[in-house]
Amino acid sequence: MHIELRNISHEFNLETGILPVLKNLSFSIPKGKFTAIVGPSGCGKSTITRLVSGLLKSNRGEVLISKEVVKSPRSSVGMAFQNPVLLEWRNILENVILPLEIVSKNIPREKKIARARELLELVGLAEFEKSRPSELSGGMKQRASLCRALVHKPELLILDEPFGALDAFTREDLWQTMLTLKKQESFTCILITHDLREAFFLADEVLVLSGRPATLQYQLSSKLGDNRKLEDLYTNETTKSLAILRKQIEIAQKK
Ligand SMILES: Nc1ncnc2c1ncn2[C@@H]1O[C@H](COP(=O)(O)OP(=O)(O)OP(=O)(O)O)[C@@H](O)[C@H]1O
Ligand SMILES: [Mg+2]
């Protein structure tokens, strides 16, 4: 699924006046690629996810998914957020199945269960399918939430700071899980994050947005290949790339 944003501008009408949030923003993500978006807090990153998922219509410009203009939400998108919001009255398996109950009503229940189990197995939660969300750790809840986002085989996965609330070690664990999922499932991915190492480790390309109203300020390709591992974050080359990204964020924050 190829994603393209063309000259997007967006503003919100507040009681106190107009708040310009995005200004002439254009970028594209090739099918199957992973793009991370970083930028100052409040610059408009979550707004971009709402535009791409069709939950919000921009004032100017357009979002194209596979060359079609996005006008409304579509089922070929999966999303996960900082707060996993799992339903406590359903066990983990039933939580993961939920999107299939909504978008794939005709699939037999056994098939839905098999699909959910396949993902739970992949992220190491097979033994916890009968647990309630409150019985899981933060990292485990986020794993379940990733399974739920992917269960209906979306072509586009949108992640808005999914690992932001986790401690550093759990976060690194989840990065590896993300790579496993990326190898196994085929999706195009947009990751919003404040963590430059996370952006660089997971993405094929990192986009740095300017301060509000945000526009594309800088673009960096990750040279880590398909078999990237955590140690790759500690090489001289990666350190240089991270320093460049850090500098770009400083520039964006001053704007
Ligand atoms: N529905 C809305 N109505 C009015 N203003 C909004 C709305 N949604 C977002 N905003 C404003 O738009 C700006 C961008 O918000 P957005 O949530 O996209 O930022 P963000 O880059 O995701 O920030 P953070 O990194 O803190 O999550 C903010 O100033 C916010 O107050
Ligand atoms: Mg946000």
Image (cartoon, helix red, strand yellow):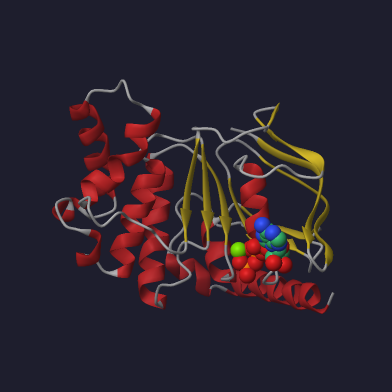
User: The C terminus appears in which quarter of the rendering?
Assistant: bottom right
- Horizontal side of 40 relative to 105 (left or right) equals right
Residue at (65% x, 28% y) in the render: 66
In the depicted structure, whether residue 208 falls above or below residue 49 = below
Residue at (48% x, 70% y) in the render: 164
Residue closer to the observer: 54 or 179: 54
Residue at (35% x, 46% y) in the render: 148
- Horizontal side of 19 relative to 143 (left or right) equals right
Do we see residue 221 in this rendering?
Answer: no
- Horizontal side of 119 relative to 57 (left or right) equals left
Q: Position of residue 13 (x, y in %)?
A: 79, 57
Q: Position of residue 81 (x, y in %)?
A: 48, 58
In the depicted structure, whether residue 255 falls above or below residue 29 = below
The image quadrant in which ligand 1 is located = bottom right
Q: Position of residue 38 (x, y in %)?
A: 65, 64
Q: Position of residue 11 (x, y in %)?
A: 80, 55
Q: In which quadrant of the rendered view does residue 101 lie?
A: top left
Q: In which quadrant of the rendered view does residue 150 lie?
A: top left
Residue closer to the observer: 63 or 86: 86
- Horizontal side of 234 relative to 255 (left or right) equals left
- Residue sitting at the far top: 106
Residue closer to the observer: 190 or 107: 107
In the depicted structure, whether residue 105 falls above or below residue 136 = above
Do we see residue 252 in this rendering?
Answer: yes
Residue at (43% x, 46% y) in the render: 182
